[in-house]
Amino acid sequence: MKTMNINTITFIIVIVLSVWYSNFERCSATRGWRTLKASSSTFNVLDFGAKGDGHTDDTKAFEDAWAAACKIEASTMVVPSGSVFLLKPISFSGSNCELNIVFQLDGKIIAPTSASAWGSGTLQWLEFTKLNKITIKGKGVIDGQGSVWWDNTGKLPKTKPTALRFYGSNGVTVTGVTIQNSQQTHLKFDTCTNVQVFDITISSPGDSPNTDGIHLQNSQDVVIYSSTLGCGDDCVSVQTGCSNILVHNVNCGPGHGISIGSLGKMNTKACVSNVTVRDTTLHNTLTGVRIKTWQGGSGSVNNIMFSNIQVSDVETPITIDQYYCDGGKCHNETSAVAISGIHYVNVKGTYIKDPIYFACSDSLPCVGITLDTIKLEPSQSSNVPFCWEAYGELKTQTEPPVDCLQKGSSSSAGIMSSKQSSC
Ligand SMILES: *[C@@H]1O[C@H](CO)[C@@H](O)[C@H](O)[C@H]1NC(C)=O
Ligand SMILES: *[C@@H]1O[C@H](CO)[C@@H](O)[C@H](O)[C@H]1NC(C)=O
């Protein structure tokens, strides 16, 4: 009887203690969690239920982590290394967010490859919109798993998404990360100002269709530098509405080169000005530095500088094409995007097809083209430079010699440009 009593008392004490202890644990854990969140304003997607196993859909966890980060100025949303997060199309919308959010990307984010994840199609996979000062940084990877889209067997939607798109934002920084195998364009900025992109890598196969590297549209004050861009289309493409764009210390290839355009498609008005591309190398690309416009457009491209451009095995290093036609039927029209003030300084290396190809509009010739210190050697063909309705000046002797550039400015350019080219 006595022993039983002692055992019972011991038993009761153990129960009471363990219940008390577990309550204590739970309370302190909760308190600790709250304190951590409020003080550090760091939001790790793993704390919001992300699995990071590469199979589970982590979209909801990312949405929840973003909703929390969004409320606090200068907060950090953490996507940790060592995990692979599968995300469906997602928008990190900032219309009601605080300033200066950092998206710390050290893990890997992958896109779904099954048709069901994409519904009837979407223009982008990962979207950041309407933010004021947003930074994506880290050593992480964004992988569009695009191969299923490139050789689309018909199951996926017709519209191929851009992997990472920023829209309507000011003060955007993207640094450190790798963006690879996009379904279509890898990184796009639309209607953004004060954009900095540096130390990034873009990588997809040279034969992957329409996988532009960086696409700029309606954006101003953009700097892209110290980056390696290899893809199946333009490494950088500068579209309508862009001005004050600087691209420097970039390696491009494979790909289609660095392009302004295409512009003026379907009789649209296009305006691009103040673009500098310098200290850049291109290897094994379709073009080096290129301006391409469609027949029938209007608006203008002016004040463009291409300097210290090193090419190797580039099909056509220097190109202006005002007869751009990307498949389908195109016919010549009288209206064109006006091209003026295009400067090439120190463009050197080897070409495969044409060293210089200027195909300007019959109705609106290119004016103010200058060539300074050009040294291009054939690695296969020995085509001579081609010019059509191209006006400008040789600042130095060139190699190969350029005899086709016309001096002065065309009379038709003056008349037409005042009508069509106001931007
Ligand atoms: C282009 O640069 C010129 C001179 O540097 C400047 O006056 C002009 O405002 C710039 N254009 C745009 C659209 O920013
Ligand atoms: C358009 O104009 C260019 C230059 O005059 C000419 O070489 C080309 O053949 C024309 N294209 C068509 C489809 O008429």
Image: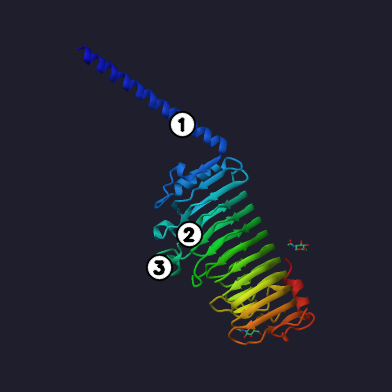
Residue 201 horizontal side relative to residue 171, left or right: left
The answer to which of marks 3 and 1 sits earlier in the sequence is: 1
Residue under pointer 1 = 30
Q: Secondary structure at mark 2?
A: strand
Label placed on residue 154: 3
Horizontal and vertical percent for residue 199? 60, 59
Q: Residues within 10 Å of mark 1 (few under 14, many from 20)?
A: few
Tell me what residue is drawn at x 38 percent, y 27 percent.
22
Three-letter amino acid code at the position of disc 2: Asp
* Quadrant hosting residue 110: bottom left
In the foreground, 114 or 246 = 246
Q: Quadrant of the N terminus?
A: top left
Residue type at mark 3 is Gly
Would you place residue 158 above or below residue 191 in this image? below
**Distance Cα–Cα, label 3 vs label 2:** 21 Å
Q: Quadrant of the C terminus?
A: bottom right
Q: Nearer the viewer, residue 66 or 175?
A: 175
Work out whether mark 3 precedes mark 2 in sequence or the reverse, and give the earlier one. Answer: 2
Query: Residue 248, which numbered label?
Result: none
Other-residue count near label 2 (Cα within 10 Å), few / some / many at <14 / 14–19 / ≥20: many
